[in-house]
Structures are given as C-alpha cells and as structure tokens.
Image: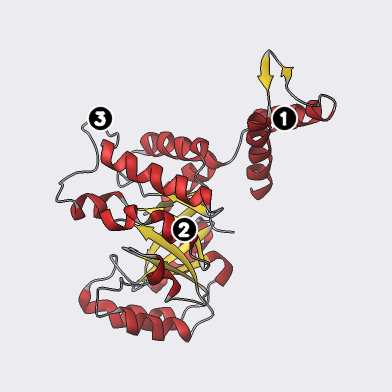
Amino acid sequence: MIGPSILFCPADRPERYAKAAAAAHTVIIDLEDAVSEANKEAARQALLASSLDPARTIVRINPFDTSHIAADLRAVRQTNYTQLMLPKCESAEQARNLAPYEVIALCETALGIHAAADIAAAENVTALMWGAEDLIASLGGTSSRLPDGGYRDIARYARSQVLLQASIHAKLAIDSVYLKIEDLAGLAAESEDAAASGFGAKASIHPKQMPVIAAAFAPSQEAVARARALLEAAEHNPGVFSFEGQMVDEPLLRQARAVIAAAERG
C-alpha cells in the first residue's frame, strides 16, 4: 500500500534512506530531479547498495526523453524494487514499456494531463500523481500558485483531472508536493483538502512534513465513530433514511466506508 505520506529522498544521499523510511509510509528514491547530472551514476550505485522494503519503496527514474533512463533501468533490474515512478509520463505506451514493473505515472506536462485517462487505463499503472511546477513550466508559465498560496485555475484543473481519471480506473491518486517547508499550516490545509477530495496519498519533500500529512489522512476518532454508527443504522434502514438530521443514501454510505477504510490503513 502506497502512502498516505510519501517522502522523496535523493538517490545520491544514501545516508538519508533509512531516516526517510522511518519517517514516511512510502519512500521515493529519486534518480531524477533531486540528483545533478554529475551525480547520476553515483546515485545508481547507491540504489544498488540499498535494502529498503520493496513494498514501501518507489524508484523515480529519469524520463524517456533523457539519456539516463536505460542506465536507470539496468540498475533497478539488479535490485528487489518493483515500483517505478515515471516522471513526465505522456502516454499509456510509455508506462506499458516499463512492464512488468508497477508504474506510478507522474503527469506533469500538458500532454501528460491530456493523456491521463489513457495512462490510468494501462494495466501496470497502479497510481497517478500530478506535478504542478513542471506542468506550469511546460506551458511557459512562471508560477503554479496565486499570491494567497492557492493554485491557479490551470493547476487546479490538472489536479482534478488526475484525481478523476485515477478514480475512474480504480487507481490511487497522489497529490503533488507542498514546497513551503516551514508553512505547516498551509500544508495541513492542502493535505486535508486532498484527503477529503479523494486523493489516497500526498507526496512531500521534507521529513518534518510527514506527521502533518499522516494526520490529515487519518480520520478523527469522532469521524470514525460517526461512520460506524451510520453504517450500523443503515443495516436496519434499507433505502434512504435519516441519521442525525441528515438524509442518507448510498453515496454517503460509500463516504462512511471510505472513512473506516482510511482508519484501518492507519
């Protein structure tokens, strides 16, 4: 199970691997953006020497349009890791070309967002994530956020598309990173919105963000108790019924089941 808290870790900083694994539900060993051109081979060697739990580890390789992907894949084949994050994923074919690996498709270009439905349908794609900054750069823009910190409309559209397409194909949707490391209140608000909207996880760039994300995705005791009570009431009330002054039908029951599932995931 990926997430709900996911932490990027530079592949050329192996001394951070264990700390990242201790802090997050899932670690992304990053061979792409977090590693300079000069350190790419050293990063692969560090990956080869690592021994994190494959079930809780993702390797972000370099995109198909770079000269590094072949060497990245040669290195990954020598490890026990089975989950790859493909940055700048722009087609289902790209994802399928990585089979039998499970692929977390990072849709972060205009073409990638446009192709999100096809990408989500690929058999070996297990999750979709969106990336705000690379998307804006691909559009020729300069900032994904407004002065008040909220996303611009185009970023909100991309975020919604990834969530919708992942859900349609029963794949996990991962929310993008929050770059203001010290703004934990802003991170909490965005993480709570992601969880309430249906994202199953949120990626991050710093260990101090982990507890905030984990808390946002963990339902409160009150929410869990209410969900259990609502589902119990539904057993005795077939069809639409009233619960604590609210009309309840199947969509609300599905929401209650989602609360219970999130609580059981921990």
Per the model, the C-alpha gap separating discs 2 and 1 is 34 Å
- The numbered disc on residue 212 is none
Q: Classify mark 1: helix, strand or loop.
A: helix
Report x, y in % for residue 141: 15, 47
Per the model, the C-alpha gap separating discs 1 and 3 is 35 Å
Q: Quadrant of residue 53?
A: bottom right
Q: Residues within 10 Å of mark 3 (few under 14, many from 20)?
A: few
Q: Residue at x 28, y 57 (%)?
A: 111
Q: Classify mark 2: helix, strand or loop.
A: helix
Q: Answer left or right for 239 relative to 266.
A: right
Q: Residues within 10 Å of mark 1 (few under 14, many from 20)?
A: some
Please name whichever residue, 61 or 49, is drawn nearer the observer in this view of the structure. 61
Report x, y in % for residue 160: 40, 42
| Kind of residue sitting beneath label 3 | Asp
Q: Would you name the residue on which mark 1 appears?
A: 225
Q: Residue at x 40, y 81 (%)?
A: 73
Q: Quadrant of the N terminus?
A: bottom right
Report x, y in % for residue 185: 39, 34
| Residue 166 seen anywhere in this rendered image of the structure | yes
Q: Answer left or right for 147 relative to 64.
A: left
Q: Residue at x 54, y 42 (%)?
A: 217
Per the model, the C-alpha gap separating discs 2 and 3 is 32 Å
| Residue 109 seen anywhere in this rendered image of the structure | no
Q: Would you name the residue on which mark 3 appears?
A: 148
